Image (tube, rainbow, N blue to C red):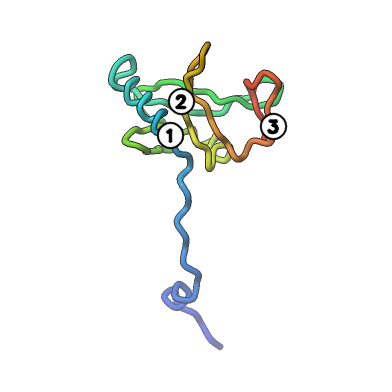
């Protein structure tokens, strides 16, 4: 009868590959966040969550908080830190957060590979 030790088992197990980042930020998003963190929201961090609302079922929910909560994931990109609610991680894996300035509005946007569709007004999405 053959027994395997932990060392032998780990020697034959495949190497773990590094996981991709939960989400990334564009340079525009990072610059806008850095400006907000330096001025109006000094000492705070942006927290991203997913709420249940809208005709497609889910919406991005962003708020500024004073500190990370026990269930928050910390994302650091381009020198800024963003918090992600742990319940939102499966919805956000692989997302890119950008900051867009348009003629009549400006704000943070998400390019999310997990989205399967959006409502007509663009306020909510489904996965």
Q: Residue at x 41, y 30 (%)?
A: 69
Residues packed near mark 2 inside 10 Å, few (<14), some (14 to 19) or many (20 plus): some
Q: Nearer the viewer, residue 118 or 4?
A: 118
Position of the N terminus by quadrant: bottom right
> Residue, x 29% and y 16% (percent of image)?
39
N-term mark: 3 or 2: 2
**Circle 2 sits on which residue?**
99
What is the x, y in percent for residue 51? Answer: 59, 25
Q: Residue furthest bottom?
A: 1
Per the image, label 1 sits on a secondary structure element best described as loop
Q: Position of residue 80 (x, y in %)?
A: 34, 33
Q: Earlier in the sequence, mark 1 or mark 2?
A: 1
Left or right position of 31 against 116:
left
Where is 102 relative to 92, above or below? above
- In this rendering, the label closer to the viewer, 3 or 2: 2
Q: 56 left or right of 93?
A: right
Residue, disc 3: 117
Numbered mark located on residue 118 in the image: none
- Label 2, secondary structure: give it: strand
Given this view, does label 1 or label 3 mark the residue nearer the observer? 1
Q: Residue furthest front?
A: 103
**Marks 2 and 1: in contact by CB < 8 Å?**
yes
The residue lying at 32 percent from left, 21 percent from top is: 35
Q: CA distance from mark 1 to mark 2?
A: 8 Å
Is there CB contact under 8 Å for labels 3 and 2? no
Kindly identify which residue carries mark 1: 26
């Amino acid at each position: 009868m053959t027994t395997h030790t932990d060392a032998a088992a780990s020697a034959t197990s495949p190497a773990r590959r590094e996981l991709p980042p939960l989400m990334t930020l564009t340079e525009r998003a990072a610059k806008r966040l850095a400006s907000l963190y330096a001025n109006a929201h000094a000492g705070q961090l942006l927290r991203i969550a997913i709420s249940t609302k809208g005709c497609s079922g889910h919406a991005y929910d962003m708020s500024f908080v004073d500190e990370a909560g026990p269930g928050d994931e910390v994302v650091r990109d381009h020198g800024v830190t963003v918090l992600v609610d742990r319940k939102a991680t499966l919805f956000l894996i692989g997302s890119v957060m950008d900051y867009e300035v348009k003629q009549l509005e400006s704000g943070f946007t998400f390019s999310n590979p997990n989205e399967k569709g959006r409502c007509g007004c663009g306020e909510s999405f489904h996965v």
